[in-house]
Image (spheres, helix red, strand yellow):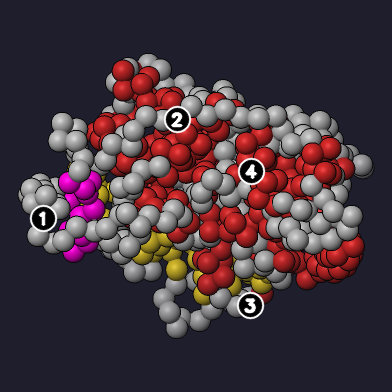
Amino acid sequence: VVYEQDGVFIHSSCGKNDDQDSLIAGILRVIEKENEVVVDWRPLDETLDTSNILYAGKDSSSVVEWTQTPKEKCSRGADRPSSYEAEWDMVTTVSFKKKPHSNGDATTHANGESKWSFLFSLADLKSIKQNRKGMGWSYLVFCLKDDVKLPALHFHRGDSKLLIKCLEKHVVLDESPDHERVLLVKTQKSLSQSFENLLDEPSYGLLQKLKKDPYTVTMGRFSKVTNYIFDSFRLSDPSNQRRPPSEMADLIHDTIPGLKINQQEEPGFEVITRIDLGKQPEVSRREPVSAEEWAKNMDSEGRILDVDYIKRSIFKGGLCHTLRKEAWKFLLGYFPWNSSKEERANLQKRKTDEYFRMKLQWKSVSEEQEKRNSRLRDYRSLIEKDVNRTDRTNKFYEGEDNPGLILLHDILMTYCMYDFDLGYVQGMSDLLSPVLYVMENEVDAFWCFVSYMDQMHQNFEEQMQGMKTQLIQLSTLLRLLDSGFCSYLESQDSGYLYFCFRWLLIRFKREFSFQDILRLWEVMWTELPCQNFHLLLCCAILESEKQQIMDKHYDFNDILKHINELSMKIDVEYILCKAEAISMQMMNCKELPQAVSEILGIESSSVTPDSDTGEDESGAELSCPTLLYQSISTPVIAANGTQDSTQQTSEMQSLTPA
């Protein structure tokens, strides 16, 4: 229940009199279910009864009535729980039909219950009519699709603003251009809906689904976007059923406004000339760091003797599994690298006390308190849904009443207390799951997760600035690496690299097997060989798939489908070698563009912007490339005059933060 208001009346004899008998008092609720959001109103005497859950039918009057047929009555056994949650578990088992209109008077069932109760899905909402401002208490009239109108709901206690605010979390409401009192439901921007029920949707049905089910989760859109984009093409083989690539590209651009790379908003773009990076070196990997090797690198007080050596060794080979529980605490920053064993024990004791103080905060919230805290309810609802579908095939989380699931839930709820502004966003359970699996301890897993979220925080913020910056940086790196491939992607409306969204959001969690992701993450956490190594991993994967994408002339739909189908098929060791080779290519380059140096955190004293005259050091005039996005007075960074004149160079336009 994400909204609840009592004192919401139906005036069953509007315009006749104001007798109390003509007013039907009820409770209005908005309930978030697994695959939809429903609005429910029912008289006070029915609020704990499931037998009167009724569906709206069309009628000539704006005041309509509903009833169930006797054979459709849902019997309730003595053992049936009467809680509100249990009621909603039953909704899908009940069907209804309309009862003929009877002059607008409230009638009752044989058992004395009213027939005015109704519910509807937000997917069926067309518009909301409001009363004029300053005209007594506020009221709303819900108009469903096919012009079905529900009875006017009068808010005798407070106004309807909170309800509208609640609904706007799930649908887009715009004022009608024809009637200022009417709010229209817009559905074309509903990509961020509940994606789980769309996983097998072919591409030709994508637009229909968008129009049909506008249910959204306030912050859940981040982790859901690529599930929907990728998986909606899973069954899209028949070419005659496909939407034109340009139409699908436009749809994605329009439906993810927070991610759209808007050239007018960006602080500046830099034109850099592609240079020859040379051949990628051969790279090999070593065996994982063993417990013996780890122990040899510690002194008598438990301090690590050579931190750089340990980090390099982990980067080149990872860790044996028995070491992860201890080493990850260092890699994630929970334990300081220079701390002694005694200092770490004292730290754990303090952090344990701090953790359980925060856990007690949400554990001690009563049901009555939670009714008045919509954000906490939203967080709990999202967490409970996500926990029940996170890594359930892993033995650590499989089965019912699994203690691993309970810990996953409790840690995520406690994190909401730690960072209430961010709270919980769908996708965060994916980041916690491997950490808890390795730690096997609630407190240690929580503080390691906190450290990981410090790195990942911007990925989950509402403005998506972290995601947008990473996509821009990835575009810059990929264009330097292979401008021809970038040009091909742009020709197929794929230049924004949206298909990499999920990779970046949850650090490849759904692209590799569970054991491989443990290896990949610990390598990335060393922060070697440069910053933003995860972007080079993206480049490595894309470069590996370039040949197939270009040789088979994949279009927009094909690219999305192909990238999605890579999940669980990528060789982690091969990609780590390739990404390291790319990093060596770039770091060995004496003429690396400044923008790339900044992304990778590489100091490059040999890179100097050319003068504004458009000439290189030898006096040869440089061609003036056309800016792809916007013109700014950023100097051109080019290869110097000693470059072999036989080498081809092409202009590279890249989006880089100024």
Q: Is residue 63 above or below residue 93?
A: below
Residue kind at label 3, given as amino acid type: Arg
Reading the chain from its start, which is encountered first: label 3 or label 1?
Answer: 3
Q: Residues within 10 Å of mark 1 (few under 14, many from 20)?
A: some
**Residues under numbered marks 2 and 1 in contact, where contact means CB atoms less than 8 Å apart:** no
**Residues under numbered marks 3 and 1 in contact, where contact means CB atoms less than 8 Å apart:** no
Residue picked out by circle 3: 157
Residue 430 seen in render = no
Marks 3 and 1, how far apart in space?
A: 71 Å
User: Which dot, 3 or 1, sits closer to the camera?
Assistant: 1
Q: Is residue 116 magenta?
A: no
Query: Which mark, by number, is residue 204?
Result: none
Q: Is residue 566 above or below residue 227?
A: above
**Residues under numbered marks 2 and 3 in contact, where contact means CB atoms less than 8 Å apart:** no
Q: Could you say which is closer to the camera, residue 50 or residue 409?
A: 409
Q: Residues within 10 Å of mark 4 (few under 14, many from 20)?
A: some
Q: Which residues are magenta?
A: 626-641
Marks 4 and 3, how far apart in space?
A: 65 Å
Marks 4 and 2, how far apart in space?
A: 18 Å
Residue kind at label 4, given as amino acid type: Arg
Residue picked out by circle 4: 312
Residue picked out by circle 1: 614
Q: Could you say which is closer to the camera, residue 111 or residue 224?
A: 224
Residue picked out by circle 2: 281
Reading the chain from its start, which is encountered first: label 4 or label 2?
Answer: 2
